[in-house]
Image: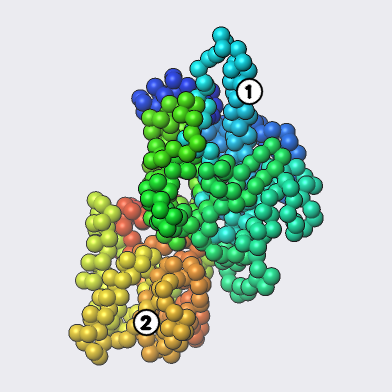
Amino acid sequence: NQAYGSYQKTPVATPISSAIHDSLRSEIDVQRWTGLDEVASGLYPITTIVELGIPLRMVRRWRLMAPPPLKLSPLETAVGGELRAYRDVMVCAREASRFDRERSIIRLTLLHLLAHVSRARSRVVKNNEKLAASAENPENQEDPPRDQGFTRPRALILLPMRNLAFETISDLVALAVPAGEKESGGNTNHRRVLNWDKFLAEYGPDEEEPTHSGKPKDFQYRFRGNIDDDFKIGIALATKSVKLFSEFYQSDVVVASPMGLKRYFEDVRDGMASETRSDFLSSIEICVVAGAESLIMQNWEHLKEVMDRLNKVPHQLRDTDISRVSRIHIEGKAGCVRQTVLLSNQRNAELNALFRSFRNHSGRIQFVERFSERGLFDLNMLPLSTTGSSHEFLRLPKSTSVLESVENRFQFFRDTLIDSVLSKRDRWGQVVVYIPSYLDYVRVRNLFLMRRKESPSSIQFGALCEHTDLSDVSRARSKFFDRQYAVLLLTERFQFYRRYRIRGAESVLFYGVPLNASLYAEVVQFLHLSDPETLRPRPVRILYDPVYDSLGLEPILGRARLAELRNQRATEL
């Protein structure tokens, strides 16, 4: 595990909390950042859960959870130290999203989150007692402490589907409620966990859950249980009880999907304006985004909109004691003290751009996986068959912006490749054109339609995207296998959500580098489903931008091959 980079201001002596000091406000105004390059072992690792500053009652509950609680992996040790320092943390490693590790990383984050909410609540309660005592003695009255935000919610957890929300909320309840307080099986409401039965009914797995046999293991893991991506739930925490489905303004933690919040913002049936519906997010102090590799396959703009609405000065105050609101909230700079945690097993430009847009004054750090020298080839995920398979990388002209890169890619395909695909059947054979972006897919599909209109005798093609009906999918796959279609267009979201094995492919053209490296291996395997006796070479061709596709190529090629690719002067490798 390697810290890709950390960006830290002058260290602050006190931990971030709801009480923001004037000196801290002045430091935030300066916004002086210093770049650091350190490995994780040189930062602030922890060795036990206790070092996170977790209350002992939560540590005891952690011990009841599997895997063994106090034996932290090196990644958990480093991430725990950065959580304690209240830095923004992004973890992009297969270990973080491995089946047995993803939940442990989330549990570690939940412990930190619950401890933060507990400390903040205790501080408010103690200050309330002091104010009540000073009210009885007018001579000793002091100014009210500024220990609150505009609204009660302090933490936001964004997840892609209800299955992950079910496990996350179950772990949160197990850490927040004393052990043994919930009846065995959790099938009945208990006074310490309100609305538990409703939670099981709406978020729990179905009685007849599909097994997804024959699908890849990561697909079985991601699409287990309830896969609805439209949900939102408020959670109110007390010392020894938890209330699920609490009203947002009466909640301490909000768990939701970007889609669920997006639809909530746009729902104005109750007469509330759209811009005021996100006021409950004005005082978020910890934001956790888990399963980012799935969120980017939904609608990334929804997540960006939710993040843009965090820590804004509310349009309407609700039961707010303005004398207790910290000045940093009043001045609209609460985003500078918000800690954000991003968890993903894939690293891409979109995730990097989002992470770098945060303004946490304590700094930010990325943990990225150190890929092997040969990428997927070292993992035996891309076996080279004896029939002459090869991976050819076609370099696009260097671009100065993302928009220019998109145009260069389309022009290169239109001017150089499409005529070859349509006419040189001996070179391409049955070809699958894999397109990561849906917008690019529409442009390429329209280009094929235009060529077919100009020349009706042109080869036929099929097109599969995430919006294609099942009947059309079956028809296109059948015609491609029967060689009635010579070309099959395929979007990355279609492959991510369906995971079909396309038979009959003799070559693959990647219009762009896949966002998910494992899908690259799956699509290449299409070539080995056809007749093994065929002596035709089975090439794999990839269009890549030397600037904007480096992050996507690293897990595929590995560090050594990527360096070789960068140093090549030829346009083909």
Label 1 or label 2, whichever comes before in sequence order? 1
Indicate which disc residue 129 carries: 1
Q: Nearer the viewer, residue 27 or 407?
A: 27
Q: Secondary structure at mark 2?
A: strand
Q: Secondary structure at mark 1?
A: helix
Q: Nearer the viewer, residue 563 or 302?
A: 302
Give neighbour class at mark 2: few <14, some 14-19, many 20+ (Cα, 10 Å). many
Quadrant position of the N terminus in the picture: top right
Name the amino acid, label 2: Gly
Q: Are marks 1 and 2 in contact (CB under 8 Å)?
A: no
Q: Residue 390, image x and y in percent?
A: 41, 70
Quadrant position of the C terminus in the picture: bottom left
Image point 38% across, 33% down: which residue? 332
Question: Residue at the top extreme?
Answer: 139
Q: Taking 232 as reference, is 209 left or right?
A: right
Q: Residue 213, image x and y in percent?
A: 63, 74
Question: Residue at the left extreme?
Answer: 454
Vertical side of 130 occupied by 465: above or below: below
Residue depth check, mark 1 versus mark 2: number of the one nearer the observer? 1
Image point 57% across, 43% down: which residue? 251
Q: Residue 193, image x and y in percent?
A: 70, 49
CA–CA distance between discs 1 and 2?
70 Å
Name the amino acid, label 1: Glu
Vertical side of 235 occupied by 320: above or below: above
- Residue 460: which quarter of the image? bottom left
Residue at image mark 2? 462
Image point 51% across, 72% down: which residue? 499
Q: How is the image coloured?
A: rainbow
Indicate which disc residue 34 carries: none
Q: Residue 337, image x and y in percent?
A: 46, 32
